[in-house]
Image: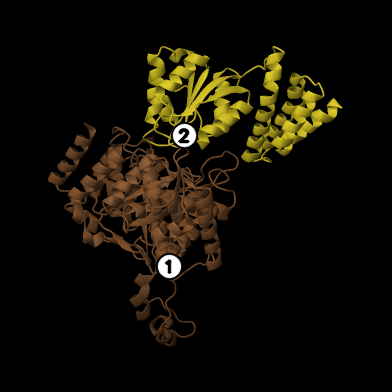
Amino acid sequence: MPQTIKSIHNPKVRLNILSEAEVRQIHTATLDVMESVGVRFPSHKALDILEAHGAQVDRQTMVAKIPGQLVEEYLAKAPPTYSLSALDPALDLPLDGTYSHLGTDGCGVEIIDAFSGERRMTTKQDVQDVARVADYLEAIAFHWVPISAQDCPPQSRSLHELEAVWSVSKKHVQTETIVNEREMRAAVEMAAMLAGGREALRKRPVLSIMQCTISPLAHDGGSLEAGLVAAEAGLPVGYMTMASCASTGPVTLAGDLVVGNAEVLGALVLMQMAHPGCPVYYAAAQTSTDLRTGAYTGGGPEDFLFGAATNVLADFYKVPLSMGAFATGAKEPDWQAGVDNSLSAFMAVSTLSDMLLGAGLLHGSRILSYEMLLMDSEIWSILQALYQGITVNEETLALDAIREVGPGGSFLAHKHTRRHMRERWQPTLMDRRPYNTWEAKRDGGREWAREKAQQILREYHPEPLEAGLRKELQKMIQRMES
Amino acid sequence: MSKEIFEKLTSSIIMGEPEATVEATQEALAAGIEPMDIIRQGLMPGMNVVGEKFSSGEYYLPDLIIAADGMRQAMELLEPELRARHQTLESAGTVVIGTVKGDIHEIGKSLVATMLSANGFKVIDLGVDVPTQKFVDKVKETGADMVGLSALLTTTMTVQREVIQALTVAGIRENVKVIVGGAPVTRGWAKDIGADGFAEDAMGAVAVAKQLMGKG
């Protein structure tokens, strides 16, 4: 059976979250910040590029002030649409503003074992196992490195993670764990080998790169330099702000958007100055700091608003968006997780965020739960049905059927019903059984999700990466390690 | 007169107005009030109220940090005066704190540093991207009771283990308690690398530090 991906396409339900005038106000405020306050780029390589293109650079503080017109000029060079390629071209993902694609979350440090239920540190084998389950799920369109291969050396860990995912899945991979130039060069070589050379990789980027900003208004030098290497190779590169209201960003949502926007735009402009026309994307997962503990929170109304608002900004700049959604702060796949992940995904898709991240992790992206991953897939299938909206035409108005059934009749066995009943949504984890059936075992979504995950892990073995290619990847990692 | 100034000190801390705290401290010194009395009768009662309001849920973390900042600014004025009188405030312990080599995330570490200071610890903040040897040298130099190691990345959290090993190699591991924290850091990890304490947030870090000093 050919593998399919169920992304959300042309959603019928849309949301107005920011007016054009409000987007302009945020844009103007952002340009003001970039020009008068500046953003820190702690890399001389990055500062050289910014300075050569007209930014005002302070080598002491490593802060670059970029005039607004430069920001607009270089952002305009970014391609508005492109595709994320997959090792299997049938699984390519168009980023053309009509799709929302769901990816896994990252990068967790613990996993709840699917069989023993034990919570433990994550390994390379776990990365591969989670990738296998994600490969199976139609809801998951692309991989993030979901968890850290902590049994591998830190200096090459990100490469081991890539190898683990590629060894079992032909879906697109977006990695967020490469934070220096050296590792990025090796990752580009690995991707080029799989794509069939550097030029082939440029045409079909099977790997895309996500880097984090350091809010407020700063970047990590390694992340910038790694991003530049990736951009040079033609891999789509995105910078993610996680500006958090009341700590790493202003407490007000609009102000937080401005701070995050300045960080992301700063990096995207840098990429366009260095490699004009290279594919880039906006990435964001803003939140509100927990006011009792100061901790990062996953979920809550502020997150949901950011999820919808950020895509309006990305659309304004005509670049795709990779948006942190799902990624609940809950400790278990429970009520809180369901509320968080449903609402955040709903809001992000309502403005057509191109990529959504966050399936499968608990506790603010720290703990992988297979149960959660399966439940997130079910949430995605609900959204898929929801976003199809209501089709109104002669056939769906069903006048013939209504005439034939008439007052007091039943539509249950009518041909019109049979013709369309497969369009109705079917749960796999929601419990719609009679009460007494439930009472006999008192089981439900969690148990079924766990059983399904166990079944996938036992039975689903996708065609592995050709042994020769895998060996080649391993050799490349070894070379980098020595 | 002095009662009025004490009230001004206390309320400025509670209201979160560091400028007013500094002003009242200067006023108190000018009026000849003893620095120890300024602390015990003016500033501390304010900090206690803030602590109570935070515990009861009325105050949020920013209230606590602003109060601590007022306290810190007042102490900067008072410390030279205490030294001149050969007086010392009892310290809960000395803590060397920093974000480990390769990691430039600051905010969590600084929050812990602020909360430890506000709770009577002497804090030496080495900043971010701190070389492993610098932690060792600073502990030796200051005779610190405790080291706090922060890491936000899964790749830099392994450096926490390296610092603990370096303390052992330097022969001072027995003299100092090590507490670790950061988003990816778990209790299991802390135990695995042989840290003495671990907390998930700043208030938790204070509780652990007090406990390790035998004052919890």
Look at 80% across and 21% down and name the residue there. B33
**What element does badge 2 sit on?**
loop
**Residue tagged by mark 2?**
B182
**Residue tagged by mark 1?**
A387
Q: Residue furthest right?
A: B1
Q: Is residue A161 visible?
A: no
Three-letter code, disc 2 = Gly
Dot 1: chain letter: A
Do marks 1 and 2 share a subunit? no
**What element does badge 1 sit on?**
helix
Which quarter of the rendering shows the N terminus of chain A?
Answer: bottom left
Disc 1 packing (10 Å; few <14; some 14–19; many ≥20): some
Q: Chain A colour?
A: brown
Look at 44% across and 57% down and name the residue there. A71
Q: Is B20 situated above or below A172?
A: above
Which quarter of the rendering shows the C terminus of chain A?
Answer: top left
Q: Is B43 situated above or below A138?
A: above
Disc 2 packing (10 Å; few <14; some 14–19; many ≥20): many
Q: Chain B colour?
A: yellow
Residue B215 or A79: which is nearer the viewer?
A79
Q: Position of residue A303 (x, y in %)?
A: 51, 53
Q: Position of residue A205 (x, y in %)?
A: 26, 55
Residue B3 or A2: which is nearer the viewer?
B3
Taking the image as shown, residue A160 lies to the left or right of residue A13, namely left
Q: Position of residue A293 (x, y in %)?
A: 57, 38
Q: Position of residue A450 (x, y in %)?
A: 36, 47
